[in-house]
Amino acid sequence: MTLQEIIALDKKYFMNTFGDRLPVCFVKGEGIKLWDTEGKMYYDFLAGIAVNALGHSHPAIVRAITEQAQKFIHCSNYYYIESQAKLAQLIVENSCCDKVFFANSGAEANEGAIKLARLYFRKKGFPKKFEIITLEKSFHGRTLATLAATGQEKYQKNYCPLTPKFLSVPMNDIEALEKAITKYTCAVMLEPIQGESGVNPADKDYIRQVRELCDRKDIILIFDEVQCGIGRTGKLFGYEHFGVEPDIFTLAKALGGGFPIGALCAKEPFASAFEPGDHGSTFGGNPLACNTAYAALSTILNENLSENSAVMGEYLIEKLGLLKEKYSFIKEVRGKGLMVACEFSTPIANEVKIKCLENGFLIGSVGNNIIRMLPPLIITKADIDLYISALDNVLKEI
């Protein structure tokens, strides 16, 4: 089909939740490159919003999907699933958690975390201890509960009344957090590095203070690592940057290397609050998803791609810093590893994104002033040099 035929079909039959999308449709990918219906090649510096950690059509991912699909794709969680058990083991042995539950998305993993925190205190005899504090500018998902947890009114306003009882406070303000805590607070839920609001890393001292405060007040600390986990920030998990460990954390996006999967990860005794019948999923943890995620995570570990993320992220930030010196309207360059944002003092982000697309580079934008870069973890300096050259030309035009 031609691009115009695809657009016409989409407008007629698909619910309009994404507005006018960028005018391109991809038909093939390899490494960090994508090709559209017209045969034009693009460099992917967005990776499906931090999903395609190994790029496109990585042999390990293709092999895992093909081999499992040839055996069988799905069976019920009524039965034991080998790849599910092996993937849980791989996560536990490389993280601070003791047990894992698999879902289909980051939002579902976060829903599970919310349920687990509330259930833990209910089973301890504190059924009214169910309030959860999150951070302003956070993003935890689009289900009703995770929308309530999200600290951005623009996502919430059309779905009131919101699921009780969530409260958001400013990031890096420990006094505001402590003031918000009541005897009914069961958890603090935060992204150690916020993604959807424009890549905002929390201060190291703040995260350590949050951990100490949760310990002192008998509150569960939940880290949403849906975007910042699995090597994205230069370490396998975002929490490793801060010298603390959460009680519960969630994963998704890069975990499946492009295949949908989410993970709820918890330490004991919190993990054991879930007993038979307390939680479940039809598709979560199915053989195809788990076999694919096992291949993706194994490759990231075996090929030291977290380390490559750290090195390439530092190089990308350095090169963007040189552009900042050149263009006065670049207000700030920030990020960790390959989770990077560039903030402008003028509302040109969308224009920059569109012009980058025209020049063969995919990036994201946040609001009117921020562009976001989340390239695959396999990226090289040569790829970054090509992007910086193209971005330089775009900024020169603007």
Image (cartoon, rainbow, N blue to C red):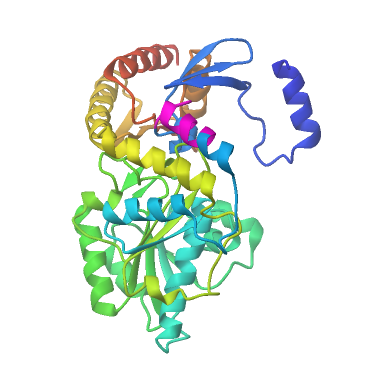
Residue furthest bottom as drawn: 125
Q: Percent x, y for residue 312?
A: 26, 27
Picture residue at 43% right of the left edge, 15% below the top: 394
User: In the rendered structure, does residue 60 fall within the stretch colored magenta?
Assistant: yes
Is 70 on the left or on the right of 62, as rendered?
Answer: right
Is 122 on the left or on the right of 8, as rendered?
Answer: left
- Range of residues picked out in magenta: 54-66
Is 317 on the left or on the right of 38, as rendered?
Answer: left
Q: Percent x, y for residue 141?
A: 52, 53
Residue furthest right as drawn: 12
Query: How many numbered badges does the structure rendering display?
Result: 0
In this rendering, the answer to whether 20 lies above or below 301 is above
Picture residue at 36% right of the left edge, 73% below the top: 270
Mostly what secondary structure, the magenta segment?
A: helix
Which residue is at the front of the view, 37 or 58?
Answer: 58
In this rendering, the answer to whether 122 lies above or below 34 is below
In this rendering, the answer to whether 38 lies above or below 362 is above
Is 300 on the left or on the right of 38, as rendered?
Answer: left
In this rendering, the answer to whether 171 lies above or below 22 is below
Tell me, yes or no, if residue 97 can be seen here.
yes
Which residue is at the front of the view, 120 or 180?
Answer: 120
User: In the rendered structure, does residue 43 fall within the stretch colored magenta?
Assistant: no
Q: Percent x, y for residue 350?
A: 51, 28
Picture residue at 42% right of the left edge, 89% below the top: 125
The quadrant of the picture occupied by the N terminus is top right
Q: Quadrant of residue 282?
A: bottom right
Picture residue at 48% right of the left edge, 14% below the top: 360
The quadrant of the picture occupied by the C terminus is top left
Q: Percent x, y for residue 32?
A: 42, 22
